[in-house]
Amino acid sequence: WALQAFQKLPEKNWERTSASDRNDADYADSIPHHFSLFEVEDHEALLSISKLLWLLLPKTLPNFTAARYGPADHIAPHDDLVLEHYTSKEVSRLAKCYDPEGSYRDGALGLKPWRGNRCFTREIAAVYYLNKDWPSDVGGEFVDLTTGQKYLPEFNTLVAFRVPRMHEVTAVESIRLRRYSIFGWWLQPEDESKAEPEVEKPSNVVKKRPAAELAVVKKRPAAAPQAGKRARA
């Protein structure tokens, strides 16, 4: 059902993204990339998958998005080390989507209200793949540049790692195939004593963190969650 949800999305619903369009060119981590996006909060089934990911670390702020890669789509080497900025209102909107019952929140997702923008760090990144019988000779691989290990975007496989970690996605070399995934991060609020001045665009974090292991969970039985109500402010 999850893969079908992707495949049934109208073409007009996919938002094309690259380093030269949208607002991505203003991001300090903007690197060459081409693929299509869809906000999971706009889709009941895809949001339910994202909720399952979030529940692995429910005391965090979720930022998950659906992605589709077509011919030549790729992401150049990067490490995901970026500060994200949210207002209290924006976090409340996410709380209504991910935690409508308030099970994990004191305020919104465990955060008290605040004024202006607040900085969040990407603590752990994840990519959940939904591609059946992906060939090994058509690109679209996740490459862990720390170890050189390559991972096919196989159906019901989750790749997760601590940020920062250098990685890339190789270009899809098939005209026919589409590579589907849900990707994103579990975010934690930056320590207020180290917070940057309020800005509207994410900025690069200039600090080092110890390397961490990359975790891959393959072919685990897929859950069939009950989709929660869609909430979009």
Image: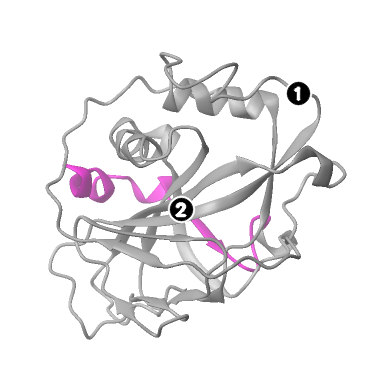
Residue for badge 1? 114
Of the residues shown, which amino acid type is indicated by label 1? Trp
Label 2, secondary structure: give it: strand
Question: Residue 218 location in percent, x, y?
Answer: 19, 61
Question: Residue 94 location in percent, x, y?
Answer: 53, 28
Residue for badge 2? 37
Residue 19 lies in the magenta-colored region: yes
Q: Quadrant of the C terminus?
A: top right
The magenta region covers 1-23
Q: Residue at x 57, y 21 (%)?
A: 108
Q: Does residue 69 appear left or right of residue 22 in this picture?
A: left
Q: Residue at x 45, y 45 (%)?
A: 64
Question: Residue 12 location in percent, x, y?
Answer: 42, 47
Whether 120 is drawn above or below 180: the answer is above
Q: Residues within 10 Å of mark 1 (few under 14, many from 20)?
A: few
Label 1, secondary structure: give it: loop
